[in-house]
Image (spheres, rainbow, N blue to C red):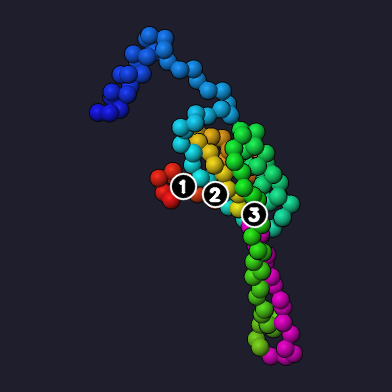
Amino acid sequence: RARDFLSAQQQRLKMSGMMPPKKAAGEYDAGATFHRIRITLTTSKSVTNLEKVCADLIKGAKEKNLKVKGPVRMPTKVLRLTVRKSPCGEGTNTWDRFEMRVYKRVIDLHSPPETVKQITSIAIEPDVDVEVIIATPDAK
């Protein structure tokens, strides 16, 4: 019901020529609701690709005049696996040591809902995983 009233009021404003002008890109109302967005980037292959994606995200957000915090470099997780070389267990005790390093970056943005999709629609390297968490303004 409130939505019907609002749309009727907007129609009357349009007809009278009193509708406020639309904002240009990068300009927002003082009362606009901003979402807190946390973008988590992880990879286990190439740190340079990870840093490139981080730089692209931050560059795009700064072009739209958004508050950006990051990239915060989280500690590298080193997953180690030590196994015997011999399949049967006989012979000399020789071991193989395998390890995988997981690199992680966190970027925090404050953005209105319209620009969320624009920010995250950049070209992302194939070995970089992206997780986007959007917190609504109500949740504290």
Q: Which residues are magenta?
A: 90-104
Describe residue 95's horizontal placement relative to residue 14 as left or right.
right
Towards the viewer: 11 or 77: 11
For numbered disc 1, what is the local secondary structure? strand
Q: Amino acid at mark 1?
A: Ala
Q: CA distance from mark 3 to mark 1?
A: 19 Å
Q: Amino acid at mark 2?
A: Arg
How many numbered marks are there?
Answer: 3
User: Is the residue under label 2 in contact with that under label 1 (CB below 8 Å)?
Assistant: yes
Q: Quadrant of the N terminus?
A: top left
Residue at the (62%, 38%) spot, across then down:
61
Task: Identify the residue under disc 2.
Answer: 38
User: Is the residue under label 1 in contact with that under label 3 (CB below 8 Å)?
Assistant: no
Label located before the other in sequence (3 or 1): 3
Magenta span: chief secondary structure: strand
For numbered disc 3, what is the local secondary structure? strand
Graded by Cα atoms within 10 Å as few (under 14), some (14 to 19) or many (20 or more), the crowding at tag 1 reads some
Compared with 103, 21 (above or below) is above
Residue at the (64%, 42%) spot, across then down:
57
Q: CA distance from mark 1 to mark 2?
A: 8 Å
Task: Identify the residue under disc 1.
Answer: 135
Farthest residue toward the bottom?
A: 91
Q: Amino acid at mark 3?
A: Val
Task: Identify the residue under disc 3.
Answer: 72
Compared with 22, 99 (above or below) is below
Label located before the other in sequence (3 or 2): 2
Where in the figure is residue 9, as x and y percent of width and height?
32, 18
Residue at the (72%, 82%) spot, across then down:
95
Where in the figure is residue 126, as x and y percent of width and height?
65, 48
